Image (spheres, rainbow, N blue to C red):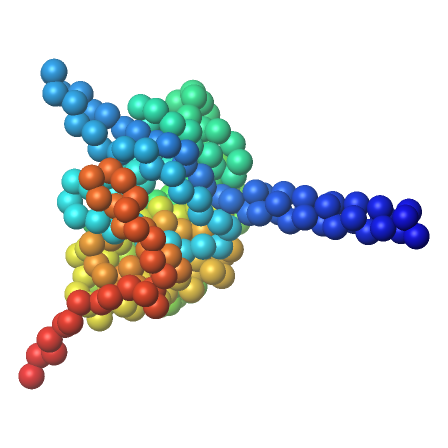
Amino acid sequence: MYNIFITINYLIVMYRMTKVLDLSNDVVVETIDVHKVYRLGRIEIHALRGVSLQVRKGEFISIMGPSGSGKTTLLNIIGTLDKPTKGKVYLDGEDITALSDKKLTQIRRKKIGFVFQFHNLIPVLTAIENVELPMVIAGVPREERKKRALHLLKLVGLEDRVNHRPSELSGGEQQRVAIARALANNPSIILADEPTGELDTENSKMVMKIFREAISEEGATSIVVTHNPIVASLTDRILQLRDGKIVKEEKPAEFQLPYIKKES
């Protein structure tokens, strides 16, 4: 009887340890006490003041805050475009804080996709050529990258716009091309900085719906920086940043949307 009791207790402990390990493996992005200080002569500007967060696989979260709160700085550090003054950043369990520029470039190419406010599409390239571009840089064979680009453009509802240049697309369509391009190399995380900043309310909702569906279909994780409360309400979690610190975390159901007066 005693041996059975010991065996049951052992199994319970092992089960709990397995759950802990599963949770840790589920974390795609983690920052620990991240600080960023910019120095202008004798002046120090504290952009981030001890930011700690975790983002799990498949999550779609937003970061909100006023201008100067540190949103873009945090996104740049997670995206390996900048380094913290202090603290640790982990992507897929790997500490990227002290990696060389060459290694960080490889991580950006393989693990991270970016969506910017102003699309950053190449004007002389068609939609499909813009989506293919990251795969060209990564050395993906032509037929494979063309097939992948067509799949992604179909995923964002632009299968009938594949040969159009950016000037022949609406703002919402250009941003959908940018989303497809960000997914080109099967990244584990998509970072979006004000992806609907140049769009009206209806187009913002439409683009975010397509964005979320595409992310889910591709099994990626996303962090969106936005000023737009409507955009934030469409994500899984909302982190509020103030003066370089996370001051609040909310679920969309708890988030108060501003009253928007309808035009008569």
In the rendered image, the residue lying farthest to the left is 264
Q: With respect to residue 189, does 49 lie above or below? A: above
Q: Is residue 80 visible?
A: no
Image coords of residue 237 (percent x, y): 37, 57
Q: Is residue 200 visible?
A: yes
Left or right for 91, reference 130:
right
Residue at horizontal 17 percent and vertical 48 percent from the top: 66
Q: Residue 51 is drawn in which quadrant?
A: top left
Image coords of residue 58 (percent x, y): 49, 54
In the rendered image, the residue lying farthest to the front is 2
Left or right for 11, reference 134:
right
Residue at horizontal 74 percent and vertical 45 percent from the top: 14
Image coords of residue 183 (percent x, y): 43, 50
Residue at horizontal 85 percent and vertical 50 percent from the top: 5
The C terminus - image quarter: bottom left
Q: With respect to residue 250, does 186 lie above or below? A: above
Residue at horizontal 68 percent and vertical 44 percent from the top: 17
Please tell me how many numbered marks the rendered image carries: 0
Image coords of residue 33 (percent x, y): 37, 32
From the viewer's side, name the closer residue of 110 and 55: 55
Q: With respect to residue 46, does 40 lie above or below? A: above
In the rendered image, the residue lying farthest to the bottom is 264
From the viewer's side, name the closer residue of 178 and 142: 178
